[in-house]
Amino acid sequence: CIVPSFTVVRQGYGKFCFEGPLNVCNLNVDEIGSRKVTVFPDISMRPPVGEGLNRRVEISLNGIWPQDKSGFAITYPQ
């Protein structure tokens, strides 16, 4: 179950691209909640750096904007 690269996508929200070959045999992507991503809900179960999902990842988020002091999204470049 080793894939050359592993990407998790949620249409309209973004994606996570994990670099390099990854064994996906025991991964449960159904545990990803809405409006957040928790890779290791139990920190004691986190593998050593470079193993499993504890590795370099490229994160792309869509439609994420800073907010002004009143709480409205700032969507213009100025």
Image (cartoon, rainbow, N blue to C red):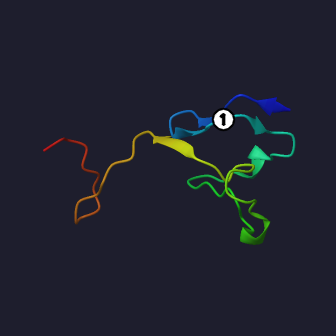
- Residue beneath the point at 56% across and 33% down: 11
Is 59 or 5 nearer to us in this picture? 5
Residue 4 place in picture, x, y as percent: 71, 28
- From this view, report whether residue 62 is shown above or below residue 55: above
- From this view, report whether residue 57 is shown above or below residue 54: above
Q: In which quarter of the image is the N terminus?
A: top right
Is 20 or 62 nearer to us in this picture? 20
- Residue beneath the point at 61% across and 52% down: 34
Mark 1 residue element? loop
Residue 14 place in picture, x, y as percent: 51, 39
Label 1 crowd bin: few (<14), some (14–19), many (20+), radius 10 Å: some
- Residue beneath the point at 73% across and 60% down: 48
Q: In which quarter of the image is residue 45?
A: bottom right
**Residue farthest along the bottom direction in this orientation:** 44
- From this view, report whether residue 7 is shown above or below residue 47: above
Residue 39 place in picture, x, y as percent: 67, 56
Q: Quadrant of residue 24?
A: top right
| Residue located beneath label 1 in the image | 20
Is 70 or 63 nearer to us in this picture? 63
- Residue beneath the point at 51% across and 40% down: 13
**Residue farthest along the top direction in this orientation:** 4
Residue 62 place in picture, x, y as percent: 43, 39
Residue 47 relative to residue 64: left or right: right
Amino acid at the residue labelled 1: Gly
Is 14 or 52 nearer to us in this picture? 52
